[in-house]
Image: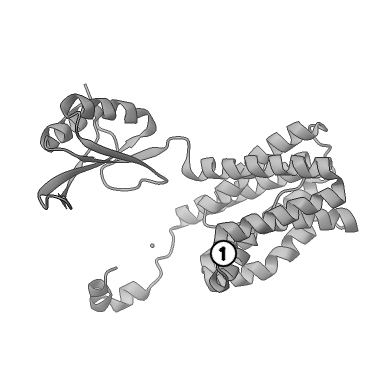
Amino acid sequence: MSTEVKAAVQPQAAAQHNKLSKAKVLRRALFLTLGAAFMAVGLEIFLVPNNIIDGGIVGISIIASHLSNIPLGIFLMLLNLPFLFVGYKQIGKTFAVSTLYAVAVMSVGTYYLHPIPPITIDPLLAAVFGGIILGIGVGLVIRSGGSLDGTEIVAILFSKKTAFSVGEIVMFLNLFILGSAGFVFGWDRAMYSLIAYFIAFKMIDITIEGFDESRAVWIISENHELIGSSIMQRLGRGVTYLNGEGAFTGGAKKVIFCVVTRLEEAKLKTIVDELDPAAFLAVGNIHDVKGGRFKKKDIH
């Protein structure tokens, strides 16, 4: 997130944890606050008044609050505290502090928003828009290095001792929690909860990855220089030539690697098809691009 040589030459530098600048700390705090605030709005203005729950600790907190008449924010804080300690041990101090701050803001936010009447009492609208707002909130917090739910920390621990993956454990826990809503709020509300959970899940991905998705492209062609030059001139994207070897022939091959946006993918395929219809081309989704020369050059 140093090679052995660097670690041997600079052991002290490798061991030190680089502190974030004040600007980065403020930026992180801002997005953590916004994310937690979105979460509080989604819960108290949309989901909770319509007896719709989310998955994880949040879902358990909503059910517990409904059965006990104790404010939701208290359960959100208390039930997450044990997982904050585990998160500190498993992931680190920065994660634990960021999560604690975000959970505290979310808990306080639900307390002050509770008296405000819901925007809609239509359960479908509440599930859709509540899920959207929740997903944006959770995504912002995750992008800022924190979390609003301890379920995944539990899943990480269980996955080390069982044959199940983290995703499978999270899915099982959430199905159990969302299913419990059927006994407490009615089965129609449990189904609306599934809708809200699915929408929130998708919005988390969109918020973390962004709308401007990027594509990693690998091209193997005898006309690699011509294709690479055309990509740089016609798309304004940089390319890298990698050395490869054919497994069947044992011959040396050049592999063109480049990263383009989703909107540029079709034009890149057109360029390759024009210059070498027999070229091997593979395209894959990538979640994040940083550094290097990914910034697009002007094309004329």
Colour scheme shown: one colour
In the picture as drawn, the residue positioned furthest to the top comes out as 300
Task: Say what secondary structure mark 1 lies in.
Answer: loop
Question: Vertical placement of 246 versus 77: above or below?
Answer: above
Give the residue pinned by disc 1: 164
Q: Nearer the viewer, residue 182 or 235?
A: 182
Question: Vertical placement of 125 versus 286: above or below?
Answer: above
Image point 60% across, 64% down: which residue? 155
Q: Nearer the viewer, residue 82 or 195?
A: 195
User: Is residue 148 visible to the viewer in this orientation of the structure?
Assistant: no
Image point 76% across, 33% down: which residue? 124
Residue 170 spot, x, y in % from top left: 62, 58
Image point 83% across, 44% down: which residue? 187
The type of residue carrying mark 1 is Phe
> With 296 as the anchor, is 82 left or right in this view?
right
Q: Residues within 10 Å of mark 1 (few under 14, many from 20)?
A: some
